[in-house]
């Protein structure tokens, strides 16, 4: 049973989110996640100031599915199956201790030691923590009158690890950072508002990540839709994010999110304000992630009464869109994807309009079959003039060059570049079709510069500092 509970596919951040769910459901206003490195004795704890549990409630909490789907729940309860605490914990540790106190009550403690369970073949819920566990609990509850501590010891993957093992120690703290970022995404809606939740990881406030840049003036909001589902309403809010030319470098990086632009496009599904699923087109037919839809993000709020229809899982990490809504969701996705791709496409053209007056666009940026093409418009009057037989009047060529310089569609390339690298650990400079193209252009430039009497090194230096080559990280490394 333990094996099956813990094999649901929890990552550490997922598992912690499940504990924070419980703290939020218990009305906590502050939640602390602590990571303490002690080699094989490292531990992780979640401490909240929620309403806590009586001894009876504590035993129920430690029992699998004692509060199941048939239980009546408050509208602020994020739980559903009565499994989360156990499954999340056993996915990460073999020693689970929960200490809890209600207002005016005393602290009560219960422990599942899976080694004891295994040894005795019995579900022995222990009352007395070991002295070491007791000391940790004392420290974590010191000065607190009520609330709950969930403590994980004997963490999976850390068995036999020495305290001095710095590599593993670093991994441990990396996990804490990942967890913080994940919680900032999943509980973002709880982290602002009139009485925000104080959520900290290792003493540092978790910063919320808002996928929709709600505060940014250039976000486009498409009409909100309310879709009826078995007597309840599912609310869908589509957003087209501002493109990189309207964001500072830092803002663009931040807005890209934990998984990067490409993997953050799509639907964000919320249940009771808690994010379940982020950046997914929900497996809807014909909807794939594509770079040109990077600016499309859609918030979907599902009522907890429709959990069954959405097939919400125990981890609260996936949903399957109900058949009755698929057509609507596909239609809305189509609208927001079209708007998003138009927003990307017009970028190079806007630059042309600004610098080239009413002339046609100098650049055509296209992406097809995984290939970025960035072509000069042969029909542009200046280009046409230069290409005319016997044409090439130096003044005209200079003008053309100036036009091209002023209209380099850097922003569009940046979007495509980010999209390209999102799935690919190799930087843009790695061997690939897109930069083979750039390579060819650079080679021509090199030839011209050398034929003008510059040394190859000097020419290379020049090209490296010229747009767009200055943006292609590692361009000259191969
Ligand atoms: N931090 C906490 N403070 C107060 N009560 C808690 C806390 N954590 C758990 N509980 C109690 O223990 C019960 C079991 O928690 P558990 O996470 O296993 O299931 P659940 O939250 O009811 O449902 P789900 O499986 O969907 O998470 C909760 O319903 C709640 O009553
Ligand atoms: Mg729960």
Image (cartoon, grey):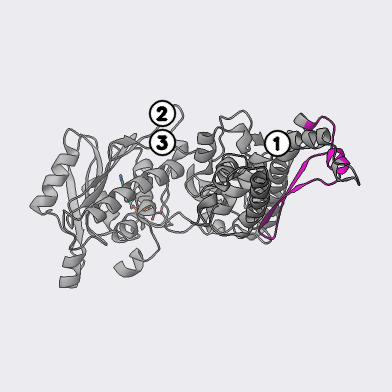
- x, y percentage for residue 112? 21, 59
Q: How many marks?
A: 3
Q: Reply yes or no: does residue 364 show up in magenta.
A: yes
Q: What kind of element bears circle 2?
A: loop
- According to the image, label 1 marks what residue? 405
- Which quarter of the figure is the N terminus placed in? bottom left
- According to the image, label 2 marks what residue? 195
Cα separation between marks 2 and 3:
15 Å
Cα separation between marks 3 and 1:
40 Å
Between 326 and 352, the one lying in front of the other is 352
Q: Do tag 2 and tag 1 residues touch (Cβ < 8 Å)?
A: no
Residue at disc 3, CB closer than 8 Å to ligand 1:
no
- Kindly tell me whether residue 136 is visible in this rendering: yes
Span colored in magenta:
356-385
Between 416 and 196, the one lying in front of the other is 416
In the image, residue 384 above or below residue 368: above
Q: Earlier in the sequence, mark 2 or mark 1?
A: 2
């Amino acid at each position: 049973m333990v094996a099956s509970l813990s094999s649901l596919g929890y990552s550490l951040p997922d598992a912690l989110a499940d504990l924070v769910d419980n703290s939020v459901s218990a009305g906590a206003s502050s939640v602390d996640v602590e990571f303490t490195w002690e080699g094989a004795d490292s531990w992780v704890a979640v401490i909240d100031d929620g309403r806590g549990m009586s001894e009876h409630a504590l035993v129920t909490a430690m029992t699998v599915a004692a509060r199941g789907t048939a239980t009546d729940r408050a509208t602020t309860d994020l739980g559903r199956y009565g499994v989360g605490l156990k499954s999340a914990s056993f996915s990460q540790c073999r020693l689970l201790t929960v200490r809890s106190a209600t207002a005016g009550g005393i602290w009560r403690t219960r422990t599942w030691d899976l080694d004891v369970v295994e040894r005795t073949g019995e579900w022995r819920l222990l009352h007395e923590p070991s002295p070491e566990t007791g000391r940790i609990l004392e420290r974590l509850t010191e000065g607190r009158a009520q609330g709950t501590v969930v403590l994980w010891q004997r963490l999976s993957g850390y068995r036999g690890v020495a305290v001095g093992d710095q590599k593993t120690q670093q991994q441990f703290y990396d996990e804490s950072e990942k967890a913080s970022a994940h919680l900032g995404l999943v509980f973002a809606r709880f982290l602002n508002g009139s009485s925000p939740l104080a959520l900290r990881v290792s003493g540092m406030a978790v910063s919320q990540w808002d996928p929709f840049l709600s505060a940014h003036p250039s976000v486009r909001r498409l009409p909100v839709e309310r879709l009826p589902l078995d007597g309840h309403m599912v609310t869908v809010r589509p957003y087209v994010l501002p493109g990189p030319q309207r964001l500072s470098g830092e803002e663009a990086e931040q807005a890209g999110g934990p998984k990067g632009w490409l993997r953050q496009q799509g639907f964000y599904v919320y249940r009771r304000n808690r994010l379940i699923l982020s950046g997914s087109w929900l497996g809807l037919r014909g909807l794939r992630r594509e770079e040109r839809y990077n600016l499309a993000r859609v918030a979907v709020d599902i009522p907890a009464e429709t959990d069954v229809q959405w097939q919400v899982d125990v981890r609260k990490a996936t949903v399957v869109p109900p058949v009755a809504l698929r057509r609507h969701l596909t239609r809305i996705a189509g609208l927001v994807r079209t708007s998003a791709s138009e927003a990307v496409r017009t970028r190079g053209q806007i630059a042309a309009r600004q610098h080239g007056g009413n002339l046609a666009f100098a650049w055509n940026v296209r992406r097809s079959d995984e290939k970025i093409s960035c072509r000069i418009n042969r029909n542009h009057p200046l280009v046409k003039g230069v290409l005319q037989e016997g044409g090439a009047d130096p003044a005209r060529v200079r003008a053309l060059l100036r036009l091209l310089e002023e209209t380099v569609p850097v922003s569009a390339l940046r979007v495509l570049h980010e999209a390209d690298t999102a799935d690919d650990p190799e930087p843009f400079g790695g061997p690939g079709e897109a930069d083979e193209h750039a390579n060819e252009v650079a080679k021509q430039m090199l030839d011209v510069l050398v034929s003008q009497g510059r040394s190859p090194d000097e020419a290379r230096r020049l090209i490296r500092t010229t747009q767009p080559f200055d943006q292609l990280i590692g361009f000259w490394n191969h």
